Image: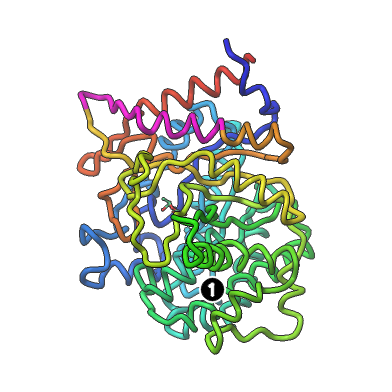
Amino acid sequence: MSNKNSVFPPDFVWGVATSAFQIEGAHAADGKGPSIWDNFCAQPGAIADASNGDVACQHYLRWAEDLDMIAALGVNAYRFSVSWPRVQPAGSGAWNAKGLDFYERIVDGLLARGLQPHLTLNHWDLPAALQTSGGWANRDTVQHFVDYALGINARLGDRLASITTHNEPWVVAVLGHETGIFAPGIKSRKAAAQVSHHLLLSHGLALQALREQGARAKLGIVLNLAPMHPATDSPADLAQATLEDGRLLRWYLDPLFKGSYPADVLADLGGDAPVVEAGDLQAITAPMDFLGVNYYSHSVVSADKSYKAGSTGLTVTDMGWEVYPEGLTELLLRLKRDYPVPPLFVTENGGAFKDELVGDRVHDKARVDYLARHIEAVAEAMRQGVEMGGYMVWSLLDNFEWASGYEKRFGIVHVDYQTQQRRLKDSALWYRDFLQAQKTL
Ligand code: FCB
């Protein structure tokens, strides 16, 4: 057997990832409050197939079966998120015991199966009650988030491997508040900039509060990052790629690791730049135990937006994203070069493809290739000296893919939404065999 992947140490974290709103369903069960995504789905035209998260994968009911399936894959970790309105329906004040009990069953169920629980606090489903007072654009939400983080850690923290504050703050800020294609559907660049600052501030203050509380889990944040490649070497494309790099990467990495916002992006924002109070930037630099990186593709930037994905011959996924594993190695090396990063985890990586169910099988060769090439890209970064802690596939299950509804399938496990039957795709079988081979290298 080839041992080209022996670069992965025995304690490397191998996982699968999901998020609460995308799989749980049970949108109003056992005292759960509505989230901004529940409300967003109700807006006509917001979701491609006019669906919602009411039922999703019924994970709230089927969690034990799902955890068995995760264990059978041979991974050693599971990344999931807590639905804030399930545990604290109004986003502040009273806690919902039944909601907390659910996540306790997940955490204890994982531990009983020998799996590390990696918990994310905010995977976008903000309690709707907080949105009525401005949501993330309101600075008060920062303190509510800190209180929520402390409540979760008090109940579960002694058994968690890691706590992630936010998943992909860029998405919440830009897609949620600038383009408005995600909840809460606001279209204001000024609001988006303020939201990004409040997310980062709440991350820093939560980390500080969690440490004071004696948190035992590793603490960090998850960013969606992509190398920006200019479509041509024209000055306009180069300049645009630099600005996009600033907006997606440096806007988050600079404050987290250097305590400042990048000057070029601030200049571009002009009067839309966020209000930053004294001490905020220092709070944002709170030391982290890990940085999570969600990687799907590189971004090809043309100033006139004329670049067509796939036009240089790269495979394009069902999301329209180019398959470009080299970009993951490039990104990880860049993080190490430009920032004093803690150990890095790939916290999401995977592809949506047009799957076909043939009997009980899904021969998703494109997804197998995607995963194999990206895992090799991680190995290459490690060979070049990047300290990597783990890798997690997005996603365990086909699920509610936000504004795309159920039309896009990212799972390594197929879900029949009529019957809720789960079937392992070839990619799940491949991942299982790959992990088994790791143990015998
Ligand atoms: C990421 C999200 C995740 C999933 C994947 C495809 O941006 O974190 O929930 O939707 O994209």
**Quarter of the image where the N terminus is located:** top right
- Circle 1 — which element? loop
Crowd tier of the residue under label 1, counting other residues whose Cα lies within 10 Å: few below 14, some 14–19, many 20 or above:
few
Which residue is drawn at the image coordinates 20% and 43% (left, top)? Answer: 418
Q: Give the range drawn in magenta.
A: 358-376
Q: Mark 1 points at which residue?
A: 94
Q: Is residue 57 visible?
A: yes
Q: State the residue at coordinates (54%, 89%).
A: 271
Q: Please count the marks in the image.
A: 1
Q: Is residue 33 visible?
A: no
User: Which of the 4 quarters of the picture holds residue 360?
Assistant: top left
Q: Please tell me whether the stretch drawn in magenta is mainly helix, strand or loop.
A: helix
Q: How are the colours assigned in the image?
A: rainbow
Coordinates of residue 151 in the picture (x, y in percent): 63, 64
**Which residue occupies the foreground of this view, 16 or 334?**
334
Q: In this view, does 96 lie above or below 269?
A: above
Furthest-top residue in view?
A: 1
Q: Could you tell me residue 264's position as x and y percent?
A: 61, 75
- Find residue 297 and report its horizontal and vertical position in percent: 46, 47
Q: Is residue 162 magenta?
A: no
The residue positioned 52% from the left and 51% from the top of the image is 103
In the picture provided, is 301 more to the left or to the right than 387?
Answer: left
Q: Is residue 421 left or right of residue 279?
A: left
Q: In the figure, 178 relative to 312: above or below?
A: below
Magenta stretch: residue 365 in it?
Answer: yes
Q: Which amino acid does label 1 sit on?
A: Ala
